[in-house]
Structures are given as structure tokens and as C-alpha cells.
Amino acid sequence: MLPDKEFLLRLAQSAPSELSTDEKEMVTLLNRERLICPLVMVNSSISGIVAGAKETWEAIEQYVADRAIEIDLCESGSIGLSSEEPVISVQLPERTRLFFARVTAEKVSSLLDDLFHQVIPDQLLIGQLRREGQEPWSDIPYLDEIPFFGLQNRIVMEVCGIIDPFSFGEYVARGGYKAFLTTIRSYTLSEVCDLVRDSGLRGRAGGGFPTSKKWKVAFDTPSDQKYLICNAEESDPGAFMDRTLMEGNPYQLLEGISIAAYAIGSNRAYIYIRSEYKDSIRRITNAIKELRVMGLLGDNILDSGYNLQISLRKGPGAFVCGEETALIASLEGRRGIPSSKPPYPSTSGYLGRPTVVNNVETLSNLPGIISKGPEWFKSIGLEDCTGTKIFSISGQVRMSGLVEVPMGTTFDTIVNDITGGANKGRKLKALHVGGPLGCTVPLELMKIPVSYATLKSEGLVMGSGGILVMDDKSCIVDTVRYFMNYVNKQSCGKCIPCREGTRRMAEILESITRKPVDEEGHTTLERFKEVMQLENLAEVMKDTSLCGLGQNAPNPVMSSLKYFRSEYEEHIFDRRCPSNICTELRSWYIDVEMCTGCSICAKRCPAEAIIGTARHPYFIVQEKCIGCGICFEVCKFTAVYYK
Amino acid sequence: MGITLEVNGRTIEAVKGETILTALNRNGMQVPTICNIKNLSPSGACRMCVVEVEGRENLIPACSFPIEESLVIKTHSPRVLRARKTNVELLLANHPDDCLYCERNGSCELQSLSEDLNIRERRIPGKKSPHKIDRSSPAIIRDPSKCILCGRCIRVCEEIMSTSTLDFAYRGNELQIATTLAKPLNFSNCTACGQCLIACPTGALIEHVQFPELETHIHAPGKIVVAQYSPAVAVSVAEKLGYKPGTDLSGIINAVLRRYGFDYVFETAFGADVMILEQARIYSEKRSGLQEYPLITSSCPAWVQFVEQSYPELIPHLSPLKSPQQLMGSLIREWFPRLYELEGKEIVSVVISSCTAAKSEARRVEMSRSGIPVIDLVLTTRELARLIRLSGLDLEQLEPDKPDAPFHSNGSVGLLTGVAGGEAEAVVRTIYQRKTGNELAPAKLHRFRIHKSFREMMVKAGNREIRVGSVSGLANAVELLKEIKRGKRKLDLLEVMACPDGCVNGGGQPLSMDEKIIRTRSRAIYDIDNGSTLHAAHLNPAIERLYNEFLGDPGGEMSKEILYRTYTKREVLL
Amino acid sequence: MNTETAQIDEILQRFPQIKRNALIPLLQAVQDEFGYISEEAIARIGAHLSLPTSKVFGLATFYNQFSFSRRGVYHITLCNGSSCHLARSGELLGEITKVLEISDGETTRDGLFSLEVQSCIGACGQSPVMAVNGSYYSGINVKEVREIIKQYREDASR
Ligand SMILES: Cc1cc2nc3c(=O)[nH]c(=O)nc-3n(C[C@H](O)[C@H](O)[C@H](O)COP(=O)(O)O)c2cc1C
Ligand code: SF4
Ligand code: SF4
Ligand code: SF4
Ligand code: SF4
Ligand code: SF4
Ligand code: SF4
Ligand code: SF4
Ligand code: SF4
Ligand code: FES
Ligand code: FES
Ligand code: FES
């Protein structure tokens, strides 16, 4: 009893009151308010797979096959708790849905045994999903009663992890595609633009540029062809909001793309997606195919006279291709090298035509804005920065995952209240916000309300919303060095300040995290001079780099120098890494008590830094030691230790 | 549509849409540039041209910023100067301190930039990228450690020469200039035209210098060292010696070469005369009916190699003649010893040419006699300038000398081959004479001397019309060939020179991308021709002697043996 | 015509339009099919799209996805994203480099292992993350990495 195309299209275009009783029945089945048989959903996106979701899935299949039970086994996206994978949810007919964490294959049969006997094993339980018309389980918390979910305001991620991303029917039965159909039926192009202007929506990719402004320029530029490009490159390591949106709710994104394309007068849209995002690609490809079948993509969509093609392009892997002009170059079949602006893509972009590049999260906001209205959107967040922002929290934190909060929420709420702060026994030290081009945020700034403007006034950036949590066992200098190395590898290499500047910065940071005695024999003074050089380099890079990559590359260095200077100084002057991360700064010693004088270490030391006489304790000459740690590895009597 | 700009407190006029750099330059203001090449698309890569624009957060690259509205600009504020200086220092951090040993010492843009910006210490230390020098090509040496990744070579090779031998490869700090699969140049489709080398601001691309090798021969007892120099050399070496561009120094060159130790000094123009004569004959013999392609010249070795690689289907239409220098080389091997009774002596044959491709050409097997190259060394104009300076002679006091007989153009027509269109013009003069018995008045050819990449003329020789074309710059040649193929253009005779404007702008010439200087060189050649009385190859008396004493009939057995060459399709990664 | 040539031809036929923007999809198809891009593939793609091969090479070397040498029987991908870095993926990399004597983008001489360092696989909650031919290992340490490699080596010799 698969719903047919006509029904789904009518559903997308009608108010609930216009449906017959039979049809309403059908809708409740489609949106899973009602079930015929038990529903089991497994998060099959990468965070789940890495934790073993594939094996969990197979175990469930085995379980039902062994017992000849009928269940509805579906893939879902992630609910955003990536440290708790594999996450599965189970809904029994008439009952609310239950979510479970860390359900690895071996736990499947006891979990399902219990559930089918109406017993809920609480070690694995996350909570139940509140839903009208369904009988709740008693003594079980609702998801929205748990701080992780309760303190969030999920408007874009609302049904991620809850719906079947492969089912167009479920999306429509939950009100999907109404926004797009209203748009093409009832609004002129500039009316859509105005609606979005009124909502105050800003680009979520990092710049916070008002979305409608960019559209307007493209709309006003006369051309035979205009393009809309969805930027799904998401190249920041540690950012995974876009992928979660694509894997959890691909139709919402495609509806958003359709609305945006219509608004700028384009009938050609591309999704530029990282080729590593295999699961996102699978879902988006399926959704595009479905929409074509439904006649929601193609020529003369539902007789509206509007044509739209959306194609998916796989980005072959380069961080800089997230930058819009580089992305366009890549789409055109060139090296992904940014070009000078002006001309901006909105006047001359893909193939020289007006092109709007928007981020996945930005576009995913559109269906909600259209269907619920700009006023609703404006009521969320701050006055000058409306709506929500999704942050991806990772690193040394209790729960890593995705957090969607209204603009203006503090880092404190996000990191401490929602994701539980530092791991047990550890203390927070700093946040790194915005990925490789982002900033190190000290604890004293945790209380500022997060918006594009407030961060900017503090000299910080939001970036795409990755938050890396660092606890007291992490080293600021090491993290910054890591980011700088990353940026240096990812620079396209076109312009001097970025190509050569990031390289020298990385080298300077490298030298700080190393023993000063290397081939070049850097003295403390020289290393200090180099650090001074960082500031000059940073300013010139900001001033003269061609694109955002080079301009923002100094951010991690400059912000950490500002807030964690003492840690740098310790590395330079005391040659010590307080958190013991920079192993190459370590000093090695031999414990006189433990050393048997076997002389193995002395024979193996590449620097001939160990002296002594056989059968007497050996000694490490610090000035000669290069810190390689070989003595530590070879000593059978654990006599070698480091400080 | 004038817009006013305020630059450093001064008001200037700008045209909407032009770049800041264009507006500045027109108003006599300079900012340093590296990656920018006049007339090619801006790339905005080096950031050397940055200026401060009021109201803009960051500095703005003047070369690629189109003016849309009034701007207030500072071109030399402390902030701008610091940025430029730091960026040059960043380049130097990855650059060897090799100036004293560098081919480009004294003519290097990086060197003068760092001087101009008063860089006096290595403030930014660092590791340098490891690189291997590519010496595989007989013509061009690539030293990536000196490359500052400006991309000029890439753009010239692509946009002007259409060979696209080079491109950027990899990215970030591994960014480099590379041929396909990073193979050595000799395994690529490089035609050795040397245009990239002219464009290169540093010593990253240089010619394969053979000057030191010459020194080992010149004083070796028993060796007869013979020089021939090409027409374009005579009018351009002056630039490197403190003379006005365009001065014809052939007399001085003869004198210096002799004092320096060359036993004989000849002009390649003689070879050109022979070539022209033969060309006219081949034309008259072969071109009876209309054909798809015209008879195409083969005097430019870069062009020849390009055809063999990219357009092997054109091989049957290429003239079978050797290039003038190779043709001369053969005569020097075969005839000259007889004339001067030097048979059995070891002869070292040296070409001095504006052409880097001639260095490659000299190594090709087709150009050898029983496995031995007919030309031993090829020196460029730049190497000649060095030789002249090294000779320690005061040029002002030197008596101009004459080249040795009979390899002497006597007239002016052989010289014309130094400039694009010259060969075609010269061939037409002889064809005309052969067909009509009269000399063609040089004035008739004036349309052929306009400064354009493609020139065309129609000459009525008796009852026949000859449509002659000349194209220079390989990219232009490719376009023209497409037109011919599509039937949009019909020609009977086509001259192709790889370098834009021909050999006066060859890869071995004094470094300059300034059109004005190149044009001065062309004009010098035209002036010589205009002032000369011997306007055609067939009027050169020495040629008659050549045929009478040595070659026999034009187009005869011996001529073919000595003057003709073969072509082979070359398989390279295109 | 040998099989590789035939396979390349088949891929080229899937992209009949001679446009530059077909270049990346074409290279992706070749990379997927062969695991690397051969000299022959470069030459044929260039000819098919009327593009100089230097441009094909220049483009392909820009992106992480393309390689010019064959992959190993076991292709190791190691995440070195920020979260994994904090979780000491650098040490894992050091271990792999030491044990297999290869660095990022290289293949062992016996053709058994190849290594690719990625920036964030997307499972930061389970850092550090490594995968061998698509099988994931998360939350691992240096010792476990050594074991995993040993295991694959034994598998191969069987
Ligand atoms: C180095 C660099 C990397 C970027 N990476 C991304 C990215 O991965 N995803 C993205 O959506 N935007 C990225 N951007 C921003 C884009 O250039 C562009 O501004 C954005 O896609 C616009 O979308 P929005 O207006 O919806 O925010 C990047 C910018 C820079 C300078
Ligand atoms: S700033 Fe960096 S990434 Fe951007 S164009 Fe310059 S070199 Fe390329
Ligand atoms: S290896 Fe250990 S026990 Fe032996 S000499 Fe060295 S420190 Fe002493
Ligand atoms: S750490 Fe290395 S260099 Fe230092 S003493 Fe031990 S073995 Fe020698
Ligand atoms: S390229 Fe220029 S700066 Fe470099 S060594 Fe040669 S002369 Fe000196
Ligand atoms: S310029 Fe300076 S360093 Fe160079 S040779 Fe002259 S004195 Fe020596
Ligand atoms: S010599 Fe000519 S063909 Fe060769 S790389 Fe340079 S510009 Fe290109
Ligand atoms: S070789 Fe010369 S022209 Fe080419 S990029 Fe390097 S410095 Fe520029
Ligand atoms: S045009 Fe002249 S200088 Fe240039 S390659 Fe041809 S023969 Fe040589
Ligand atoms: S600051 Fe370097 S490891 Fe601590
Ligand atoms: S000359 Fe303007 S950026 Fe290079
Ligand atoms: S950083 Fe390794 S999975 Fe994200």
C-alpha cells in the first residue's frame, strides 16, 4: 500500500482539513504517528558506522529473521549525539519512540528481547520522544527533559535522526514541500527575497552575510542563465553540521535549494559536496531522483511554468574549495584556486554568470522561514542576528555532537550545560572555535552571547561552527601548531603571503614545540625573535592575502598569543610543555636507583648523549640529548623517565 | 566616463572598468608588480602591487581591481611598503643566496625588488623546498629553487604559445611549476621557444649556456672555429651594450668575434638567401593547383617541432628546407673547407642566434651528417653580449669589419628573416621576379610591415595571384590553421614564426617584454632593407657562386642532399 | 586494445560532452575504477577534452582524491582532524610511518599497504579514528594500531 505520486503531491499542496478520513489515516502512517508493526531505526551515517552501526543493523536483521518477527527496519540520520553511537530508536505500535545509545551488535538481542517484553533496559536508554497521540512510557524521561536536548532549540535539525531520510512520503507527511509549492505558486521572485530579508537570515557558513542581499545582486544582474550553488564542501576538520543535515533530512535541503533558486531566477542548481561524504551523497542522490519522479524537479514543475534542475557534484578534496570562488573554479574543471573579488560570484560566477553560493545550513533554514513566516524566525535568537546556529562540539568533552541553539546563547551553555563540559576529572582550558581559521577562546569569554557581531567585537570569529573543546591535558601551542600545519598544507599556494606566510608560521610554531638543539641550533633568543616575527607576518597576511584562507590563517596564532601568552613563554624560555604534549620538548633522565648499568641505552642513543661505565648507573648529558626517547624505549629496567 | 581618483593626494582621471594599475601607469605612477603581464589576463597572485584604498579593510591589488567609483588611494604608505617588503622577504626565505653565481645576476626582478625595498637582512629564516634542477633540455634549464611561482611562464606558454607545457602542480607549500607528470622538459612538448624564459622574473628559467664550452674550443690549437650570427642578433645585442635599442652592430660584431679568436665570421643571412631562393623554386614547382593547406615555412625550429608533435598532418605541407642556420651549417661542413683548403681540419661550427630553439635543433639527428651534428654550439644574443664584454674591447674605438666571403648576405633580404613576415616578403620578391622577370618594388609590400600577428597580402605575379600570409606566436598560428581548415581562409604560402613578431623577439634575445623595444628591433631591420640596394636573394652574387661551384642546379640532387631535411611525427604528452 | 585502454574508453564514452567541467567527474571515474590515474589515462582524458595534459596533471595534483600510484591491498585511512589530533592521532601516524615505512600518500614496496591521512572522517565523537579498506577502528592507541597492521599482514600471507 505504497502511497502513489498523485496522493503525495496532493498532500504537499493541501491543508489537513482538505483531506478525507482515509487520507488522514494514510498520513498518520506515513509520518509514523501510527505504526502497523514495530519500527527500528539505526543511524547509518558515518558516526554510527564507525561505532559499529553496520554490525548492529546486521544483528537486528538476524534477530528478526531468527524469530520470524515483522518489523520495519529503517536507516536514519544522526540525532547529533556522536559520542554515543551507535544510536538506534525503537517505536512499538501506539507507543512513543525510545532512543538508545551505544547499541553495538552484541547488545542487540537482549535489548530487543527486553523491549518486546515491554521492559526498558536503562543502561542504554537516552529517552523517549514526545509525540501527541502516542502512549508514553512511564518513568522514562522525554528527550526534551534531558539537558542535551532540552536546552537546544532545534528548528533546522528538528527531525534529523527521527525520520527516514530516504522517504519522500515521510517528509511530505510532516509538512514538507509546502513551502516550495507556496513559493512558486504565490510569490514573485522578489517577494521571496523580501521574506528572507525580513527574517534577517544570515549566511551560516561563517561570514554572516545577509542572505537576501546576495540574492538581490544576482537577481538584479541580467543574464541568460543564473546559478545557485549549495556549498556542501564542509571542509573544516571538526565540523559536521552540514553532513548531519544532509544525512538526516536531505529533502529539507533540496526544498531550500529550490526556494533559493527560484528567488534568484535560476533554473540550474548544483550541490557541491565533499566526495568523502559517501552517505550524504547516497541520500541526496536518492532524494533528487525521487523529486524528479514526483515532478518536483524538471521542466514546468507542477504546471507552474518554473523549471529547475539540481545536480550533484563531488568535490575532489581540498579545504580551500569551500571558498566560493575556488569552489566555482573547481566546478568549472580547474584547480580550486580562489580569484580576486570583485567581481563577486553574484555578478560573475560559474561560467561567468551570476551565481549565488549558499551553505547547507543556510538553505536548510528556508523551508521553515517560508512556511512559518519571517516573524516566527525573527522571534528566535537576537534582534540583529536571528534564528539558530548549529555547532559541532568535539574534542575533550563529555558528549560530542551537534548542538542547535538560538543565536545569542553563550559558549558556557553550549559546552558546559548542553554537552556536559570536560570529561570526568579534567578541567576545561579553552575552546577553539571556527576550525583552522578560527580562534582560541579563553574561559573568561565563555559568557558572551554568541553572534556574528559579538564575536567580531571580541576579535573572534564564528567560522562554520566547529567548537573544539580543550581540557587541562591539552597544549594550546600544540593545537595552534596543528592548525597552522593544516592550513599550510591546504593553502592553494597562489599568493605569497598565504603560501609562504603559513609555512613560516608553522615552522616557527614547530620550533617552539621542539628542543632548541637541532641542526640549526636555535637559541632561546632566536626563538623569541621568531615569535615576535609572527605578529608582523600575521598583519601582512591579513592585509594582503587574496582570500579568506590566508586572511584568517593567523587567527589561531594571534588569539592564542593574546590569551595564552604565558604558555608560549613557558615553551620558549623554560623549554617545557606544561601539559606534556610536546614530547619533543621533554627532558630525559636516568633513575640512579633503577639503572643496572647494562649500557643498552648508551649504545642506542643516536646523539651519544649517554655516558657511564658498565654496571654503574648511566647519565644523560642534557646538552647533547635530542629528546628522541629511544633510551626510554630500550631500557629493560624502566630506569629512564622524563620530566 | 571619467572617474577621479585621489592618489597620494593628487587627483587623476580614470576610466570606469580599468584596473587601478592601468590608471596609475597612464598617469606616470608606478607600483611594483610580479605576476602581472601586460595584455594577458590579470592573476592577482603575487600581491606585490597592493595599495591602500580608503574604506577597505585589506590592501587591494592594483593589477586586478577594476575601478567602478571614485577611490582614495595610497600607493606608498608605510603600511603598503611594509606589506610589500614582508612579502618579498617571504619569497627570499625560500630562495637560495646564489645571486653571484646566477645567470640572472643583474637582470633579476627579484633582486631589484629586494634592493628597491631596502631588504638588508634575512629577517625570516626557514627551510627551503628541496628541488632538482632540470637540465634535460638542450635549450632550457629549469631551476625550481629560484622559482617564485608567479605563473608568468605558464601564462605565456599557454596564452601566447598554446603549447601549455607547464602548469602549476600540487598546492600549498608544495606548489610547483611542472610539466605533465613532472617529467623532465625534454620529455614534454616544450618547443624550446624560450618565451617563458623571457617572461621569467628570476633565474628559474634560463637558457642552456654554451659560452664556457666555446672558450675551450676557441684557443685549442688546430681547431678552426667558425661563427655565424643571425640577423636579429645584429640589431638587438646593442641593448645589452649600452647602445640605443635598434642599433645595427653587425660591423662591430664581426670585428669583436675576430679579435676574440674566431677564425671565420659569417652571416646566417647568407643561409637565409639560399633558403629563400629554394623556397621560391619549391613554391613554383609544387603550387600549381589549389590545395587545402598552403606551403608552410620551416625556418623556425620551434614551429617545426610543434607541427611534428601537435599537427603531424601538416608535415606534407611543410617546406622541406632546413632552417637558415642549419643550412649554413651544412655548407660550412661541406663547401667551406674546400673553398679555404681546410679539408681534414677540425672545424668547430658556432651559431649565434636569437633563438633558444636553435640549441635544441642542433642536437636533433635529422640535423647531423653521419651521426655528427653539423652545428657544434649555439649561443644566444645574451651570451654574445657577455662574450663582447668579456673580450675587453672598447667598442667605440673598434673599426667595424666585414664578414668573410662568401657567406655574406651582401644585400638586405636575408636579414629580413629576423622579423615576422620577412621571410614571406623575401620569397615573394623572388617568386615575382621568377614569374615576371621584373623586380618587385619594395613599396608594394608595405602592408606586410604593419605590426600585427597575422598579415596577409595578395601579389599579382604575371597572370597568377599569390596569397601570402605570415603569422607569429604559436597560439595565433593555431587559430589561423583552424580558419584555414574550416575553409575560412585560403593561402598559397604561409610563413610561421613561433615567437610573437618573429626572431627579433626570440627566446635568446635581451630580456624584455616591452613591445616598444621589440618594435624598435623590427624597425631597425626594415630600415636596413629600405636603405639597401640589393633587395632580393637572387641578386646576391655569392649565391651564384655557390650553385656554380658546389650545388649545381637549384633543386638538383646535391641541393636536396645538402639543403633538405626530413620530419618525423613525435609522440609526446600534449 | 588492452583491457585498461578499453576500460578508459568506456569511461570516456560516459562523458560525451567535450567540456572542461567534465574533467573532474572523469578523473573521479578513473580514480574509482583503477584506484589511481595512469599516464595513459591522463593522455586519453586530455585528448578527449582537448585539454593539454599539463592541465590535467596540474588539476589532479591539486586535489586529495587523485593519486598517481597504485594503492596497496590494504588502504589505511587515518583521521588527523582536530578532534583526532587532540586524541593523539599524530602518534598513530608516527607508528604507521615507523612500522610500514611509508608516509601520507605512499604505498609499501610490497604493494600491501598504502596510507592516506584525512582531515576529519566525521566521527569526532570516537576519536582517534582509522579505517582499513573501509573497516573502521575507533578510540585506538599505538599498540592497537601495531596489532591491526600485524593482523592484516598475517591475513595477506595466508
Ligand atoms: C577558506 C574558506 C573555506 C570555506 N569553507 C566553506 C565550507 O566548507 N562550507 C561553506 O558553506 N562555506 C565555506 N566558506 C565560505 C564560502 O566562501 C561562502 O562564503 C559560503 O558558502 C556562503 O554561504 P552562506 O552565505 O550561506 O554563508 C569558506 C570560506 C573560506 C575563505
Ligand atoms: S590566501 Fe591562500 S588559499 Fe587564498 S588565494 Fe592566497 S594562497 Fe590561495
Ligand atoms: S638501559 Fe636502562 S638500565 Fe641499562 S644503562 Fe641504560 S638506563 Fe641503565
Ligand atoms: S632521548 Fe634520545 S638523545 Fe636523549 S639520551 Fe635518550 S636516546 Fe639519547
Ligand atoms: S634568481 Fe635573482 S635573486 Fe635568485 S639567485 Fe638569481 S639573481 Fe639572485
Ligand atoms: S654585492 Fe655585496 S655581497 Fe655581492 S659581491 Fe658585492 S659586496 Fe659582495
Ligand atoms: S620554451 Fe616555449 S614551449 Fe617550452 S615551456 Fe617555455 S614557453 Fe613553453
Ligand atoms: S619559472 Fe619563472 S616565470 Fe615561471 S613561475 Fe617560476 S619565477 Fe615565475
Ligand atoms: S621565431 Fe625565431 S627565435 Fe623564435 S623560435 Fe622561431 S626561429 Fe627561434
Ligand atoms: S604547550 Fe606544548 S605541549 Fe604544552
Ligand atoms: S602584480 Fe598585482 S598581484 Fe601580482
Ligand atoms: S577529527 Fe577525526 S573524525 Fe573528526
Image: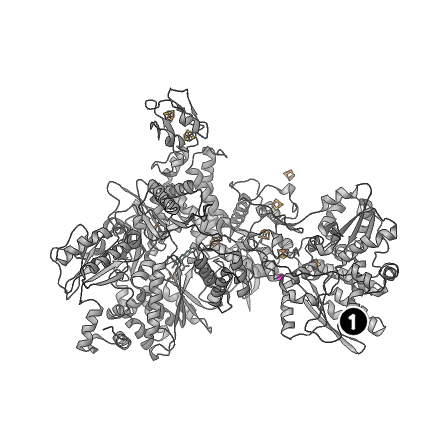
In this rendering, position of residue B519 left or right of residue A615: right
* Magenta stretch encompasses residue B162: yes
Instruction: Please say whether residue B440 is visible from this viewpoint.
Output: no
User: At numbered mark 1, what does the secondary structure look like: helix, strand or loop?
Assistant: helix
Q: Foreground residue, A181 or A615?
A: A615
> Which image quadrant is residue A75 in?
bottom left
Image spot of residue B380 (x, y percent): 72, 51
Quadrant into which the C terminus of chain B falls:
bottom right
In this rendering, position of residue B67 left or right of residue A372: right
Q: Foreground residue, B70 or A620?
A: A620
Crowdedness of circle 1 by 10 Å Cα count: few (<14), some, many (20+)? few
* Magenta stretch encompasses residue A195: no
Q: What are the residue bounds of the magenta stretch?
A: B160-164
Instruction: Please say whether residue A594 is visible from this viewpoint.
Output: yes
**What predominant SS class does the magenta segment belong to?**
loop
Image spot of residue B175 (x, y percent): 51, 51
In this rendering, position of residue A182 left or right of residue B22: left
B285 above or below B540? below
Q: Foreground residue, A539 or B430?
A: B430
